[in-house]
């Protein structure tokens, strides 16, 4: 399948571009970015064509992968879907419910397939853990803690304006919702409490009856950074395995290949825009609760 890449930042150069270039059944046709200089450089590194017009790229491909800020992605994804392109999207799909639903509805109208790159859903050890959780059953709850250090000089995303503006809720929160949904089932209710800077504690009620908790910040002290997650219930405690080193690149190749399969088979992917939009709805509800508490 002929793919185009939208974006030229760190994520595009580290994961999306190399992932598409190496993915089976994928031909990387070209790259478009908001910086012509960066676009030319990345296209040269990937051995593909730099486009100076996104619409021209959409016209030349069958699918588009996005590695741009969510508010940029939402607008371009609507246009790409209208041009008949299948969508490989970043999380969050958008930072407003209206924009997320607009992308979903555009894809539905055009009849194009979609996959949202919720990373852990495409990593083999994580998938094995999800399978074990589902096969075992009897889970009453779960947890996820993710502390990152956006201000660490070595953080490749430290210069990302939208991450600093939106914080961990919108940057890491989509992963948390996706991961705990895959383990414990759809989330039907969220409650949110904020702390220092972007620190947020979320409590999820799942359709299964389970309750899970999430603690997130993008501004943790470097010694405190880390990730852990798990579920608990009748069988005891089952921790989620850590991500293997350098897992993101292979995971993205899996996501691209599964978008191709979704198109070929005509079946929705479990991590499509239906999930992506629901995640944005939950994040927006959490953000509204945090805003209301600040006003109080």
Image (cartoon, rainbow, N blue to C red):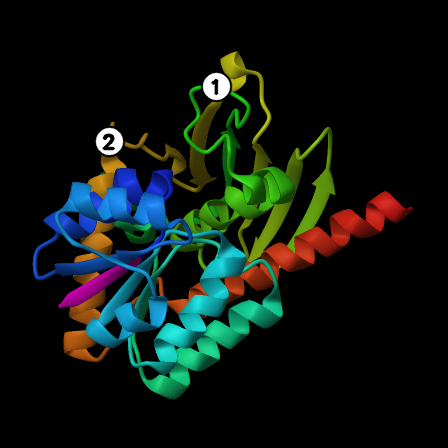
Given the current orientation, which residue lies at the most extreme right position?
296
Q: Which is more toward the observer, 150 or 127?
A: 150
Residue 127: give x, y in percent of width and height. Answer: 26, 47
Q: Is residue 5 left or right of residue 23?
A: right
Q: Is residue 192 left or right of residue 268?
A: right
Q: Main secondary structure of the magenta part?
A: strand
Residue behind mark 1: 153
Around disc 1, counting alpha carbons within 10 Å, would you say few (fewer than 14), some (14 to 19), or many (20 or more)? few
Res 207 seen here? no
Residue behind mark 2: 246
Around disc 2, counting alpha carbons within 10 Å, would you say few (fewer than 14), some (14 to 19), or many (20 or more)? few
**Sooner in the amino-acid sequence: mark 1 or mark 2:** 1
**Residue shown at the point (57%, 45%) measured from the top left:** 162
Q: Is residue 99 above or below residue 128?
A: below
- Asked whether residue 181 is drawn in magenta, I would say no
Res 234 seen here? yes
**Residue shown at the point (36%, 35%) measured from the top left:** 240
| Disc 1 secondary structure class | loop
**Residue shown at the point (49%, 65%) measured from the top left:** 74
Q: Which is more toward the observer, 190 or 27?
A: 27
Given the current orientation, which residue lies at the most extreme left position?
24
| Disc 2 secondary structure class | loop
> Distance from label 1 to label 2 (Cα)?
20 Å
Residue 186: give x, y in percent of width and height. Answer: 48, 61
Residue 280: give x, y in percent of width and height. Answer: 55, 60
Chain part drawn in magenta: 1-5
Q: Which is more toward the observer, 254 or 52?
A: 52
């Amino acid at each position: 399948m002929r793919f185009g890449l939208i974006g030229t930042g760190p994520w595009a150069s580290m994961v999306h571009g190399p992932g598409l270039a190496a993915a089976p059944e994928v031909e990387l046709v070209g790259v478009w970015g908001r910086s012509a200089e960066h676009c030319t450089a990345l296209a040269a590194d990937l051995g593909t064509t730099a486009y100076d017009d996104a619409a021209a790229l959409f016209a030349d491909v069958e699918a588009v992968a996005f590695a741009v800020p969510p508010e940029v992605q939402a607008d371009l994804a609507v246009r790409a879907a209208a041009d008949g392109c299948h969508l490989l999207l970043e999380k969050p799909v958008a930072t407003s419910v209206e924009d997320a639903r607009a992308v979903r509805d555009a894809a539905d109208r055009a009849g194009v397939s979609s996959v949202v790159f919720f990373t852990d859903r495409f990593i083999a050890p994580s998938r094995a853990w999800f399978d074990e959780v589902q096969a075992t059953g009897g889970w009453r709850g779960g947890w996820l803690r993710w502390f990152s250090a956006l201000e660490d000089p070595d953080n490749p995303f430290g210069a990302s304006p939208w991450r600093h503006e939106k914080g961990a809720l919108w940057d890491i929160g989509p992963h948390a919702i996706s991961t705990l949904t895959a383990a414990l089932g759809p989330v039907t209710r969220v409650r949110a409490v904020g702390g220092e800077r972007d620190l947020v504690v979320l409590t999820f009620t799942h359709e299964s009856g389970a309750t899970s908790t999430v603690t997130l910040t993008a501004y943790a002290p470097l010694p405190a950074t880390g990730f852990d997650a798990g579920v608990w219930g009748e069988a005891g405690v089952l921790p989620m395995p850590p991500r293997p080193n350098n897992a993101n690149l292979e995971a993205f190749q899996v996501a691209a290949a599964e978008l191709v399969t979704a198109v070929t088979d005509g079946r929705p992917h479990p991590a499509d825009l239906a999930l992506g939009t629901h995640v944005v709805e939950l994040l927006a509800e959490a953000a509204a609760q945090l805003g209301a508490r600040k006003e109080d």
